[in-house]
Image: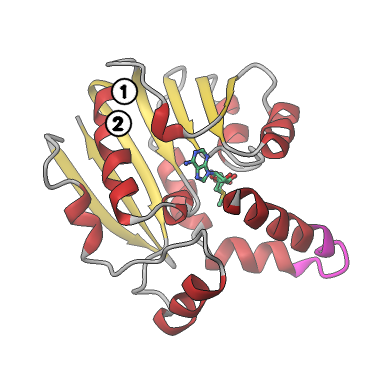
């Protein structure tokens, strides 16, 4: 699967970062670590959290564990889940497509961090928003952090062509994802290089 191939490419780079210790820092800064951190800061201690595209857990699961959250973490990539298990062995892990996951009115928060929505095309992003609404409790919040084409458009458009599992999009698009879903409040703010989107059910 393309997504897993992309993950392997990124992890190969991270391993190289042992040679260049700045690589990971530059990568995280460029792809919105600030927005991810701020998004995680909104999560209350002890809450039930669904983590979409948990990856290796080094950012999301580590912080959610510190906050004593009850975590369900989903990723397509087995290797990523194995890495995340080392960081937070007590989470519930699901290997598979988060677009197939349904647990009605269950979660206080759903987090989709560090560019995970950029792995989806527009139709899938709309599907994600609908599913998040279904899975959140009333008053629950969907927290997304993502880089759009308002940051470095030329390079990111080229990246769309090069990596077939990434889709950077024009900034106007993100409002449209919510068009037919009844979230009570949707906020989109710029944090460093990325956008932080918080939608309250
Ligand atoms: C850029 S990583 C982000 C990892 C993590 N959220 C973080 O903040 O470090 C995106 C992850 O989403 C996963 N992913 C992408 N599309 C997915 C899908 N439809 N279902 C489950 N996982 C998916 C990828 O396998 C990858 O591990």
Residue 94 lies in quadrant: top right
Q: How is the image coloured?
A: secondary structure
Q: How far apart are marks 1 and 2 (CA)?
A: 6 Å
- The disc placed on residue 131 is 2
Callout 2: CB less than 8 Å from ligand 1: no
Q: Ligand 1 quadrant?
A: top right
Highlighted range, magenta: 15-22
Relative placement, left or right, of 83 versus 19 is left
| Residue 90 position in % (x across, y down) | 65, 16
Relative placement, left or right, of 137 versus 35 is left
In this rendered view, identify the residue nearer to me: 24 or 95.
95
As for residue 42 lying within the magenta part, the answer is no
Local SS, label 1: helix
Q: Are marks 1 and 2 in contact (CB under 8 Å)?
A: yes
The residue lying at 64 percent from left, 69 percent from top is 26
Q: Name the residue under label 1.
A: 135
Magenta stretch prevailing secondary structure: loop
The residue lying at 74 percent from left, 69 percent from top is 22
The residue lying at 52 percent from left, 64 percent from top is 164
Is residue 43 visible to the viewer in this orientation of the structure? no
Local SS, label 2: helix
**114 versus 60 height, above or below:** below
- Furthest residue to the front? 1
| Residue 27 position in % (x across, y down) | 62, 65
Is residue 128 visible to the viewer in this orientation of the structure? yes
| Residue 112 position in % (x across, y down) | 43, 42
| Residue 20 position in % (x across, y down) | 82, 70
In this rendered view, identify the residue nearer to me: 35 or 113.
113
């Amino acid at each position: 699967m393309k997504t897993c191939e992309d993950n392997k490419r990124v992890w190969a780079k991270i391993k190289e970062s042992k040679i260049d210790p700045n690589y990971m820092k530059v990568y995280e800064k460029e792809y919105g670590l600030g927005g991810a951190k701020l998004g995680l800061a909104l999560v209350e201690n002890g809450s039930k959290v669904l983590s979409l595209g948990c990856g290796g857990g080094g950012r999301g699961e580590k912080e959610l564990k510190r906050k004593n959250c009850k975590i369900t973490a989903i990723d397509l990539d087995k290797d990523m889940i194995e890495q995340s298990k080392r960081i937070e062995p007590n989470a519930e892990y699901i290997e598979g497509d988060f677009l197939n996951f349904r647990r009605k009115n269950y979660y206080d928060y759903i987090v989709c961090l560090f560019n995970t929505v950029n792995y989806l095309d527009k139709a899938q992003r709309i599907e994600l928003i609908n599913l998040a609404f279904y899975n959140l409790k009333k008053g629950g919040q969907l927290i997304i952090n993502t880089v759009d084409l308002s940051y470095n458009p030329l390079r990111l458009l080229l990246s769309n062509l090069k990596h077939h599992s990434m889709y950077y999009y024009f900034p106007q698009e993100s409002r449209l994802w919510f068009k037919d879903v009844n979230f009570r409040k949707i906020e989109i703010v710029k944090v460093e290089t990325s956008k932080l989107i918080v939608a309250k059910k």
